[in-house]
Image (cartoon, coloured by chain):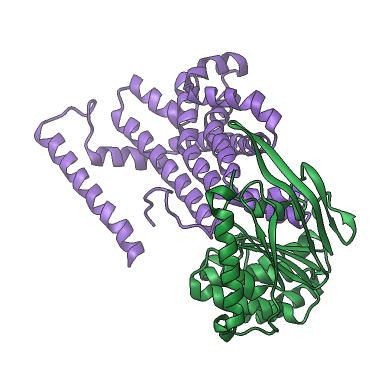
């Protein structure tokens, strides 16, 4: 019952919003190039898929996001683990990472275009950069949360450092790591779309941008909704994995999730 | 079995150097149960960590079976105040942790672990996760884990301190039952005088920082001891004696 109501209640609010939207557009005679009616947007959405227009762009953006996200996350895990384990490395590198985290990575997008060209590479690298930092910092913080007594106990059994890392520290950090992965999903989408806005011939970001030229606002809305669906799907997937992998922790602090 | 000679430990903090232990000497014979009582912050736990090979002493040395301790040893079993179980491993896997770390034969260890779980009254909980157990049950898992690799020297750092009074008594009895058959030596740290007397063959009283042994008391009460032992006049007499000694140690004149 819970699962059903988790879907039903937001659907009811969405329906109300759509109805109000529709009525306002019709009653106030808003021109469609400013705000199209919800049915027009739905039409553009369906049409985008039936005409085959969206598929290629959807695939392109998905590749950017998935490849960039996976690479960035792996890099963040490895570097985060190294930072948490090596005092020297931490002294030299951690302050820089904390500093870079404060910088808006999208500001690098034009530079990345100059360096890596207008193809998919520059977008992937932007995605890597943007989802790297929160996960890296979370990994360091998570590993440091390890109970020192637990480490002492393992050391008393002459356990190797590697064993302690994989069997004690990494599982301790798992909750924080998944929180970082969760943040990374939405950031990865931002990275991909910004990259496409700046210079691209493909992708959903490009579709939205290109629709401005023809003032096809319905298409813009359809693109935005498509991105929203991608974000929700990705976040749900990570949330599902979080629950499965870190089964021993309560799900407190991972946000209010439907499902 | 275990012998500490003039063990001292000083460490530096922002506020200056702190002398945690000063010339602490003690012996634990083969098969003997020695309890250390002392005020909190006197360095009891620090000494235990030195004996476990986790910290190196600044001066003096600790020998186990005649060999100077330079690092962790496989013939030592350890348990802390907190159960320190891995929440992502089952009870059985937690008990098996030392066996895995020491790369013992897993088939034998598994049988031994299950038998130990039976003996601490957790026979039916091998497949459960720690969060499904009460604090007392978690600490029983800790006891089983301490024994799984058949250590000859046990180091116990206030293992029952975090438990409620009832569970504490039950576990003290169970610990005795667990150890009665073997020939293990035990160094048991506590801040409860009755617990020290109840469990030990010999009680050592530790002074305030820098900690050293200021009193030694033999407990000539026969084993197995029962709950009724705690109302025995001999038992009460020994506790009173220690309490008196404790108060002397704790007075301002006794500290520096």
Direction from residue A153 to residue A1 in the image, left or right? left
Q: How many marks?
A: 0
Q: Residue A127's x, y, as percent?
A: 54, 30
Q: Nearer the viewer, residue A103 or B115?
A: B115
Q: Is residue A40 above or below residue A206?
A: below
Q: Residue B150's x, y, as percent?
A: 79, 71
Direction from residue B205 to residue B73 in the image, left or right? right
Q: Quadrant of the N terminus of chain B?
A: bottom right
Q: Residue furthest left?
A: A27
Q: Is residue B12 above or below residue B255?
A: above
Q: Nearer the viewer, residue B122 or A236?
A: B122
Q: Is residue B244 above or below residue A47?
A: below
Residue A221, image quadrant: top left
The tint chain A carries is purple
Q: Residue B181's x, y, as percent?
A: 77, 82
Q: Quadrant of the C terminus of chain B?
A: top right
Residue at 48% across / 43% down in the picture?
A182
Q: Residue furthest front?
A: B253
Residue at 56% across / 66% down in the picture?
B243
Direction from residue B98 to residue B210 in the image, left or right? left
Direction from residue A145 to residue A106 in the image, left or right? left
Q: Residue B31's x, y, as percent?
A: 80, 73
Residue at 12% across / 30% down in the picture?
A29
Using the rendered image of the protein, determine whether residue A134 is visible from the camera's viewpoint: yes
Using the rendered image of the protein, determine whether residue B192 is visible from the camera's viewpoint: no
Q: Nearer the viewer, residue B122 or B32?
A: B32
Residue A43, image quadrant: top left
The tint chain B carries is green
């Amino acid at each position: 019952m819970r699962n059903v109501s988790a879907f039903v209640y937001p659907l009811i609010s969405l329906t109300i919003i759509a109805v109000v939207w529709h009525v306002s557009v019709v009653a106030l005679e808003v021109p469609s190039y400013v705000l199209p009616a919800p049915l027009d947007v739905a039409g553009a959405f369906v049409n985008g898929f039936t005409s085959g227009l969206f598929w290629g762009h959807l695939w392109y953006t998905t590749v950017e996001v998935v490849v960039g996200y996976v690479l960035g996350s792996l890099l963040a895990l490895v570097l985060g683990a190294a930072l948490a384990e090596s005092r020297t490395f931490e002294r030299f590198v951690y302050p820089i990472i904390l500093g870079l985290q404060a910088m808006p990575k999208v500001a690098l997008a034009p530079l990345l275009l100059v360096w890596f060209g207008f193809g998919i590479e520059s977008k992937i690298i932007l995605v890597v950069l943007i989802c790297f930092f929160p996960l890296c910092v979370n990994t360091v913080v998570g590993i440091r949360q390890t109970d020192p007594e637990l480490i002492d106990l393992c050391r008393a059994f002459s356990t190797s450092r590697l064993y302690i890392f994989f069997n004690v520290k990494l599982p301790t950090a798992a909750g924080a790591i998944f929180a970082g992965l969760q943040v990374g999903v939405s950031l990865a989408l931002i990275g991909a779309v910004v990259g496409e806005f700046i210079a691209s011939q493909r992708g959903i970001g490009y579709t939205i941008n290109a629709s401005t030229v023809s003032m096809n606002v319905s298409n813009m809305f359809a693109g935005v909704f498509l991105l929203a669906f991608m974000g929700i799907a990705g976040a749900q997937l990570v949330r599902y994995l979080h629950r499965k992998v870190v089964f021993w922790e309560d799900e407190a602090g991972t946000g209010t999730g439907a499902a | 079995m275990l012998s500490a000679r003039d063990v001292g430990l000083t460490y530096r903090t922002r506020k200056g150097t702190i002398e945690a232990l000063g010339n602490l000497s003690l012996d634990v014979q083969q098969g003997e149960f020695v309890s250390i009582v002392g005020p909190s912050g006197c360095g009891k736990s620090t000494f235990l960590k030195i004996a476990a090979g986790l910290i190196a002493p600044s001066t003096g040395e600790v020998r186990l079976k005649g060999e100077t301790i330079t690092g962790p040893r496989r013939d030592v079993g350890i348990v802390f105040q907190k159960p320190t179980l891995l929440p992502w491993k089952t009870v059985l896997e937690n008990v098996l942790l030392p066996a895995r770390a020491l790369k013992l034969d897993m088939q034998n260890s598994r049988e031994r672990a299950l038998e130990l779980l039976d003996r601490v009254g957790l026979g039916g909980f091998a497949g459960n996760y720690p969060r499904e157990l009460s604090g007392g049950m978690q600490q029983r898992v800790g006891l089983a884990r301490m024994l799984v690799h058949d250590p000859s020297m046990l180091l116990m750092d206030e293992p029952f301190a975090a438990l409620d009074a009832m569970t504490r008594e039950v576990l003290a009895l169970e610990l005795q039952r667990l150890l009665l058959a073997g020939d293990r030596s035990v160094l048991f740290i506590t801040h409860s005088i009755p617990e020290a007397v109840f469990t030990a063959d010999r009680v050592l009283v530790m002074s305030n920082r820098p900690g050293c042994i200021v009193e030694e008391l033999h407990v000539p009460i026969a084993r197995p001891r029962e709950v009724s032992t705690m109302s025995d006049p001999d038992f009460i007499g020994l506790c009173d004696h220690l309490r008196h000694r404790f108060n002397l140690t704790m007075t301002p004149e006794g500290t520096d």
